[in-house]
Amino acid sequence: MIPVAEVGFYESWWVQLLKALVIFAVVFQLVPIVLLAERKALGRFQHRYGPNRVGPFGILQPMADIGKLIFKQQFRPRTSVAWLFLLAPAISMFTAVATMAIIPFSNVVDIFGTEVGLYGIDPDIGILYAFAFGAIAFYGLMLGGWASGSKYSFLGAMRGAAQLISYEVAQGLALVGVIMMAGSLSLTEIVEAQSSLPYVIPQFVGFLIFLVAGFAETNRPPFDLPEADAELVGGYNTEYGGGRFAAYFAAEYLNIIVVSAITATLFLGGWMLPWVDPPTWVDPIVVLAKTLILVWFFFWVRATLPRLRYDQLMSLGWKVFLPLATLNALVTAILVVVT
Amino acid sequence: MPWTAGDDVIEVIRAPKAGPVRGTYRAFGETLRGLKTTFARMVEGPKTFQYPEEKVPVYPRFRGRHKLHRFEDTGLEKCVGCSLCAAACPADCIRVVAAENTPENRVSAGERYAAVYEINLSRCIFCGYCEIACPFDAITMGHDYEMSDYNRSDLIFTKEMLLAEPLDRTPLRNTGE
């Protein structure tokens, strides 16, 4: 019998539980920080200060926003499908958090005599797990748009569907090069393989494609077509308000963190730093720093680029990125075999 | 029958369609240029005023809230209750009721004085015609622009309020500033 997923390292159940709680807590603390950082960064990019009224330097602004949203009336349109309408934000939230489980913050370390791998899980399927949850995350968006029973929400969801199929293929193919070079799907092994050189240099084309597809996957500008505030009045989340909207909103920012963390792991060398070999306790900080730099890049792009037209987005995905990613995978395969 | 364009029809000459190299440059080079532009804006820093704490100074001729004046030597009011300001006011927000000065009760320098002088600032459009109409320079436009209130009736300024020295709330712009 073939095991479903071969576990390279065994931990007792309480270690796994503790790990899950710590990762959940850390990632959830990042959401308000990223939320505030985005508004501050956007302000700076536009010669403004951004929020600076609530608390010192405006650090309580995300708390005020969340408090406002939670105390709002829970509203559901008459035409909506009740249970799907309630389920959709939860799916978005769940998949975003679940993907975070495979981000490795460090390899197996010794904490007070207990061997602990600083990651949620390290399955052999590794990056495929992230793609699986990325595909499920799309159900949160699609069901939310469809179950709202509103044409704007539905249009947003349809755009989301088309966008997803345009980008997920190219995104997956962009990673094939990395997987071939590392010879493994496991994220920890991919990071270990980058000890001499982060893959952003040999796999630069793959990095670019993965990053751009990441923008599309998280519905961030310039690919925020499913939400498109101007023409779709918010897209798939038009009919959502209060806590449910807060769930969608938090899921969006969680997705940004997750995509940044995966990019940092796969292309920027995870906890590895070039030329220096820091002690083990620095590793999670290095991963978080690389993640936040990429998150900041998301803000930078949002402040710069206007939203693409619908057909431009599709033709970019199918006509440019898919052939480019295929070519990249092909060249990498030849080079891996030759050398 | 073939259609031929007349002389008045302009042919639009478009740039040649971008090839693969030029297209790639447009996609990536121009994106990088855009990123550079926004980054430079961030380096420049914010240009906004933190309004309630940091006020934009006004120019000397700024038309803010009105002021009524007294003679500095005698302390008598300059206003003689002629109602020319009320007549000039396009928004009809000034109300003047005049009364006779008596030797016992001397308020203004002229024959009569304004017993009631009210400006409804919720109607005032700050055009400054009252200032121009006034033959004795008794009413001028001040520099105060922070006049919001919770109540419409609180925006009707009486003579005492207009005569009082206004709170120094608005900085005045210096020469060359």
Image: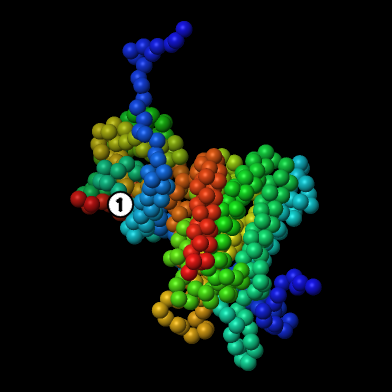
Disc 1 target residue:
B57
Amino acid residing under circle 1: Pro
Question: What percent of the width, then of the height, locates residue B116?
Answer: 40, 39
In the image shown, does B129 or A187 lie closer to the viewer? A187
Which residue shows up at 60% across the image and 88% down it? A111
Which residue shows up at 45% across the image and 82% down it? A277
Counting every numbered tag in the picture gives: 1
Q: Is residue A224 above or below residue A65?
A: above
Which residue shows up at 67% across the image and 72% down it? A123
Disc 1 is placed on an element classified as loop
In the image shown, does B1 or A46 lie closer to the viewer? B1
In the figure, residue A217 lies in which quadrant?
A: bottom right
Question: What percent of the width, then of the height, locates residue A180?
Answer: 56, 66
Q: Is B163 positioned to the left or the right of A242 in the image?
A: left
* Any part of residue B20 in sight: yes
Question: What percent of the width, then of the height, locates residue B109?
Answer: 25, 40
In the image shown, does B35 or B131 lie closer to the viewer? B35
Furthest toward the top, the residue is B1
